[in-house]
Amino acid sequence: MKSAVLLLAFAWLMVASHFVIGGVLLSKGRPALHQQLAGLLTHPGQLGKDLSGIIVLQFQVSDDSRICRVRVFSGNAAIDAHFIRQLTGRKIRLLHPEFGQVHTIRMHLKSNQ
């Protein structure tokens, strides 16, 4: 009987999209937000060759999971435009998306030198 319960629990974990172990919510099949953004963004190249420091990104996710209303705070209009172009309209997967929620990300940019 005990092995049957363990087998059922294991089978449930295999098909569940997310589960809780020890109070920590674990997600299967969805990379973390910072991992998804890292896959979408590239270094601004020549625009940011001398720029290093913290850049703040703010965005919302539409009801069809696309990034919208992107704002970038870098102090450099060309850098801001670069990241806005890269993110706007791209799809992102969130565990519990809430339309209208503003996501704020701090990014550390290092110079190419």
Image (spheres, grey):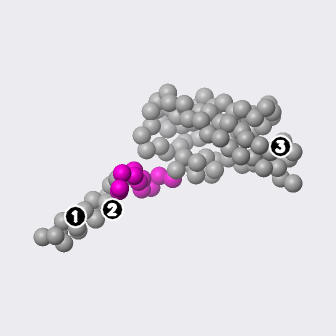
Report the residue marked by disc 2. Answer: 14
Q: Nearer the viewer, mark 1 or mark 3?
A: 3
User: Amino acid type of disc 1?
Assistant: Leu
Q: Nearer the viewer, mark 3 or mark 2?
A: 3
Is residue 103 rendered magenta in the image? no
Residue most extreme to the front: 22
Label 2 secondary element: helix
Are the residues tagged 3 and 2 within 8 Å (C-beta)? no
Instruction: Please report the residue visible at 75 percent of the width from the left and 46 percent of the height from the top.
Output: 109
Residue 62 numbered mark, or none = none
Mark-to-mark CA distance, 2 and 1: 10 Å
Mark-to-mark CA distance, 1 and 3: 54 Å
In the image, the segment drawn in magenta is: 21-31
Residue most extreme to the bottom: 3
Report the residue marked by disc 1. Answer: 8
Instruction: Please report the residue visible at 33 percent of the width from the left and 62 percent of the height from the top.
Output: 14
Instruction: Please report the residue visible at 52 percent of the width from the left and 34 percent of the height from the top.
Output: 61
Mark yes or no: residue 16 visible. Answer: yes
Q: Position of residue 74 (x, y in %)?
A: 75, 35
Other residues around mark 1 within 10 Å, as few (<14) / some (14–19) / many (≥20)? few
Tell me: 46 left or right of 3: right
Query: Which of marks 1 and 2 precedes in the sequence?
Result: 1
Report the residue marked by disc 3. Answer: 51
